[in-house]
Image: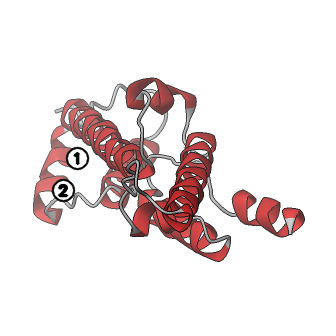
Amino acid sequence: MISIQGSLFSTVPILSRDNYKKWREDLDVALFVIELDLAFREPNPIITATSTTEENQKLEKWETANRKCIILMKRSIPENMKDSVGEMDTATEYLTVIKEVFEVFQSAEKAELMNQILLAKFDGNGSVREHFLEISSMVKKLKDLETNLDDDFLVSLTLKSLPE
């Protein structure tokens, strides 16, 4: 059972600028298969002085699943994101914050790429073709981040980046 769990953990990729959707799907599958998704499916059970043994066991199972989910998520996000996420009590809170931080990182990357495209100027080093390919590469990265630019606008910007 340990080797199956270990191999499932390894199927969850490290979260990067362009794989949040796949990361989340792989995380959900891994947690479901090893029955840790309890922390996402059910709220934290409330225990009182009159709680039964069964209710106490349910809480213990939920807390174990919650801790393991958090550890798996921590293992699959980059170090710079871990600093931004901080510590959370529940896996659902942790996942919500990861998504928010990812969206902020993604917005910053979109802004940086847009800025690079707008400020691109052909400086005479290399060929015009290479210059066009660099701009094209930035546009592709924006498309990967689900930001599309109008083709006519791109042609105009690209031509404007050339010297008179």
Q: Nearer the viewer, residue 128 or 107?
A: 107
Number of other residues with Cα within 10 Å of mark 1, as a class: few under 14, some 14 to 19, many 20 or more: some
Q: Which amino acid, by three-letter code, is at mark 1?
A: Thr
Disc 2, disc 1: CB below 8 Å? yes
Q: Residue furthest front?
A: 50
The quarter in which the N terminus is drawn is bottom right
- Where's residue 10, x and y in %? 74, 58
Q: Is residue 147 above or below residue 67?
A: below
Q: Find residue 100 and name its label.
A: none
Residue 104 x/y as whole percent = 27, 38
- Look at mark 1 in the image and give the residue it sits on: 158
Question: Between marks 2 and 1, how big is the CA–CA gap?
Answer: 5 Å
Pick the front one: 116 or 51: 51
Secondary structure beneath dot 2 equals: helix
Image point (54%, 45%), residue name: 70
Which residue: 11% across, 62% down? 152
Quarter of the image with the C terminus is top left
Q: Amino acid at mark 2?
A: Val
Q: Give the residue at x 40% y 50%.
A: 95
Coordinates of residue 115 in the picture (x, y in percent): 22, 33
Visible in this render: residue 52? yes
Give the label on residue 155, or none: 2
Secondary structure of the residue carrying numbered label 1:
helix
Q: According to the image, what is the colour scheme of the structure?
A: secondary structure
Q: How many other residues sit within 10 Å of disc 2, few (<14), some (14-19) or many (≥20)?
A: few
Provide residue 125's location: percent of width, then percent of height. 46, 27
Q: Quadrant of residue 61?
A: bottom right
Say whether residue 152 is left or right of residue 69: left
Name which residue lies at 45% across and 49% down. 91
